[in-house]
Image (tube, rainbow, N blue to C red):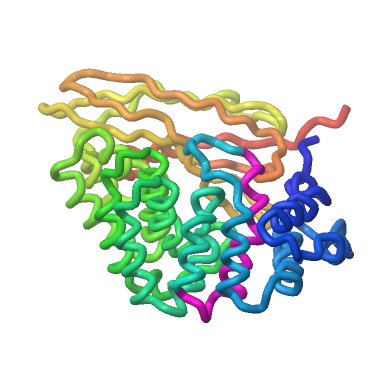
Amino acid sequence: MAEALKDQFGEDIPQKIAMMLVSAFPEFDSDAFIQACLCGYNELELTARARHICEQMGKYLPEDFSASSSILIRSLDSPLNSTKEFGMGPFLYLPHVFYAAEYGLKHFEDAMELQYQLTQRFTAEFSIRAFIQAYPQQTLERLHQWCSDPSPHVRRLVSEGTRPRLPWAGRLPEFQKDPTAVFELLEKLKDDDSLYVRRSVANNLNDIYKDNPALVNKVAEKWLKTADKNRLWVVTHALRSAVKAGDKQSLAVLGYGPPELIEIEDTTIHPQSPEIGQTVAISCVLKNEFKLPQSLMVDAKVYFIKANGQPSAKVFKLKQVRLKPGQQVEVNKKIALKQLTTRTHYPGKHQVSVLLNGNEICLGSFNLLPAKMI
């Protein structure tokens, strides 16, 4: 069994932080700090552990935020020299990030400098949001400056910190209502040299789409007019939720317009009565009977029966293909019907469709049976 995240943020973390703080501030009472941090520590989850450490930092560091933030900065290790995966190591600085937001909100310049340094070792995407809400104009001006910072970690913070629906963080309701300010930042980052930054841009747009689909489609269409392969990737990745949902406007932006005269032949759904725990195979042949080539985004859609007996659709990606006039292609998908933590299967009739550029065409159904008792 994989080790729980909180166990990777164990009792050694307060001890490491204490050693770092003593190196920058010899008067720091490391023994009392560690003892306070470890009180009730094992009962807490990861985020709660980080907040608990943050609270103790607030008690044992100087009250003056200018002094305490200076100590924290001096205690930091060297900046990350890579944008590759770096595991749980940088999570050491999660308490520092919480400290910046909790104790630095009335000290804008000192707090921004602390976050600028922290994001080059971990990320300040969680703390910067408090400053966006408290000082929207001032913080946005700073983020615009950071768009051209030499560090990809700082540039990524601009995009990641302004995501309206950032995971593990509270939402930014003002950006959910009106993402104009975010678009202005992403415009500067969309062609960034670093994939690390461009991926964040795509994730931000994917967030915005959930509240403002028409606006994101408009931005995507604009960006694609002069897009190179890197920007094409950004737009395609940004619209992944839209494509999965079959948003016809998004698909049209990506060049997948309404299909014309596509014949569906040789459909098979086998077996017709699989048992829970088995696999069902779905296949069909698509033929372009139109006089012009057509680009197709092909997905399968299965209406799984839920506990209440009602269907709930799930989309499976199949293929992207360009068919010449008269050309045909076979598409197929094997779907495991075993019980999963993310999906529980129930007996009943399951409808199956194919999606062609978001247009749904029924292929048939299979009747899922209970698993046989051994």
- State the image quarter where residue 185 is shown: bottom left
Relative to 198, does residue 157 appear above or below in the rendering? Answer: below
- State the image quarter where residue 140 is shown: bottom left
Q: Position of residue 10 (x, y in %)?
A: 80, 49
Q: Position of residue 200 (x, y in %)?
A: 41, 49
Q: Is residue 97 magenta?
A: yes
Q: Position of residue 322 (x, y in %)?
A: 24, 26
Q: Is residue 202 magenta?
A: no
The image quadrant where one finds the C terminus is top right
Q: Residue at x 19, y 44 (%)?
A: 224
Question: Relative to the observer, which residue lies in front, 342 or 339?
Answer: 342
Looking at the image, which residue sits at the far front? 26
Range shown magenta: 87-108
Q: Position of residue 343 (x, y in %)?
A: 66, 44
Q: Residue at x 63, y 39 (%)?
A: 87
Relative to 108, does residue 221 appear above or below in the rendering? Answer: above
* Dominant secondary-structure state across the stretch colored magenta: helix
Instruction: Please say whether residue 250 is visible from this viewpoint.
Output: yes
Q: Residue at x 31, y 39 (%)?
A: 193
Count of numbered badges drawn on the protein = 0
Question: Relative to the observer, which residue lies in front, 211 or 80?
Answer: 80
In this picture, residue 298 sits left or right of residue 28: left
Q: Residue at x 73, y 47 (%)?
A: 5
